[in-house]
Amino acid sequence: MVDTLRKRSVAYLLLLPGAFWLIVFFVIPLYFMAKLSLDVEIPGTLHYHFTWHWDNYKEALELYKTQFFRSFIYAAIATLLCLVIAYPLAYVIAFKAGRWQNLMLFAVVAPFFTTYLVRTLAWKTILADESPVTEVAHSIGLAPSGHILYTSFAVIAGITYNFLPFMVLPLYASLERIDVRVLEASKDLYASAGSTFWKVTFPLSLPGVVAGTLLTFIPAVGDYVNAEFLGGANNRMIGNVIQSLYLSQSNYSAAAALSFVLMAVIMVVVFIYLRFAGSEALMGQEAV
Amino acid sequence: MRVAMAVAALALAVAVAGCASGIEGPVESNVEKVELEAKPSGELVISNWPLYIDKKTVPDFEKATGVSVAYHEDINSNEEFFNKMQPLLSSGESGGRSIMVLADYMVAKMIKLGFLMELDHSALPEVKANLAKNLRHPPFDPERKFSVPWQSGMTGLIVNKEKANNVHSICDLFNPEYKGKVDFLNEVRETVPLVMKCEGVDPEKATEADWLKAIEKIDQAANDGQISRFTGNDYAQDLTNGNAVAVMGWSGDAVQLQADNPNLEWRMPTEGCMLWSEDMIIPVGAPNPTAAEAFMNFVYKPEVQANIAAYVNYVTPVEGVQEILQKTEPEIAENHLIFPSEEFTENCSPTPTLEGQEEKNVIKAFDEVLNG
């Protein structure tokens, strides 16, 4: 009896730092944000009072639905591109790299050694109108207008580049765990390379696919750095809107309301996705 | 255990609520006035914009007064800086800062909110003697009770002569020949009035409808891809990278840009420019106002201001500087961007003030354009 009690209190103690972190830096700020999102400013004072003002939500959504929609489209395309680029890469690292494996993994992670901002700013120079990249693309007909920078292409390319490692690493982790004997068995049973991949390898790597897409998609929707630096006047995302509501319009209530809507929509999208993909895929088949 | 955790969480919530309560509650109306000590001493924290002072002035001030200065270049945008400071200022604190440099319209707003200390002019004899006549009685602070100008400047065109030599007016920026190669400023009080001038509307007499009409025109151009981007100082990068060939830009920047690329040139739009000033202010709760006023006074000595003017290339608010520079750096003394004549700025307009609901509607409409 005493023993089980002690075990339980140990479990609570272990949870304490995490719970403390979550309460102080998530639950409490969330409460204030929720309150702020229903506040109204006393005109000309920057002071707010609480009135259950649900119109904040309505107005914010009506005004900024374009940017909302755009954020989800950009993030979805970027996630898909990441998957298409990362899967073959992770596959090679897991199965074919041999002694180069560690070096290749290092190469995937290496960009993290410099800051995200600097890397995005570097793209600004690479994609500038008079850069060799743009000129070559223009001359072979890939950039008919002569611009790449400040277009939606540049923003999506930036997001794809910046979030690629978040896709590669979980994919690699799940591919690497696959028992090669299963693949050999498939071959022994006369499956072609193609059907081995689609019937054995890919389903076994699904936890990695689900984890990778979530790790890419969720932060990509709220991203604002890429649209800020690589996007033009018509490529702003919802993160940029929230930032400007807060820092240039001093409209804290609308900013809070938009943040909540964003959070809710992401949760719904992720929930549907997990129902569709099967949450057991996320946990890994072994866990079932 | 569970109870203990709940209690801890509750205590924290109360503590945080206590801190955050500055957001609510009534505005204080009694204005704090600077109380001077006999001699400036101690530490002085200044917030200013990047590249807005020469390298000599601060060390010289430290030597002359014994005050040690922490000079931060942490202001990049009036709105951003204001919104970051606002929670502190509402609770009567300045975050250790004793001087901030902000645009006229922001200073006007902060006076109304009771965020500034009233200056004691007995410690500002140099300001009294040398402040330019046309800056002595601005409408937002008629007796200069709260603000002392730092620098003034002009907003007009910066053009790449090689690629857009025919751009002479704000209207020319809408010419499809330059599609996608034009940047506008993200400052509502400069961009929109300039476009109104192109439309033949005097910004000083503009109605809300005039503002919204000009914003509509800008929106159209942004949607058509005529305007590539809305920028702050970063138009400089677009001009040097060739992403833009003609932009709305600030006079002082052009002098510096020209040094890198002789093809870049600031032009007075045929419609006239926008004139603006930025002011030094002492925020409420500022720790060392005596040293702050000593610094304000110090930079108004013409020989000190001459160094600043020669470095930053904006329009100096201090009289007597041109005479000094004529002897030391005659090419700067002759530059009409730094010492503009009255004929040169004849058609220019002061930055308009927007108030109340009109301000809200205009800023909201412009922000929708910025956010595409």
Image: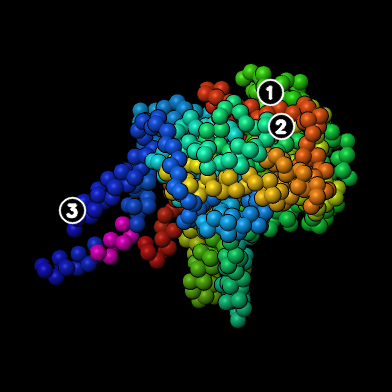
3D distance between C-alphas at marks 1 and 3: 63 Å
Instruction: Choose the circle earlier in sequence order: 1 or 2.
Output: 1
Q: In this figure, which residue is indicated by the disc labeled 1?
A: B203
Q: Are marks 1 and 2 in contact (CB under 8 Å)?
A: yes
Callout 2: chain: B
3D distance between C-alphas at marks 2 and 3: 63 Å
Q: The disc labelled 2 sits on which kind of residue?
A: Met
Q: In this rendering, is residue A270 above or below A181? A: above
Q: Residue at x 61, y 42 (%)?
A: B126
Q: Residue at x 22, y 67 (%)?
A: A10
Q: In this rendering, is residue A7 above or below B243? A: below
Q: The disc labelled 3 sits on which kind of residue?
A: Val
Circle 3 sits in a helix, a strand or a loop, which is it? helix
What residue range appears in magenta? A13-20
B129 vs B326, nearest the viewer: B129
Q: In this rendering, is residue A12 above or below B233? A: below
Q: Is residue A271 magenta?
A: no
Q: Main secondary structure of the magenta part?
A: helix
Q: In this figure, which residue is indicated by the disc labeled 2?
A: B274
Q: The disc labelled 1 sits on which kind of residue?
A: Pro
Label 2 crowd (10 A; few <14 / some 14-19 / many >=20): many
Q: Residue at x 82, y 48 (%)?
A: B330
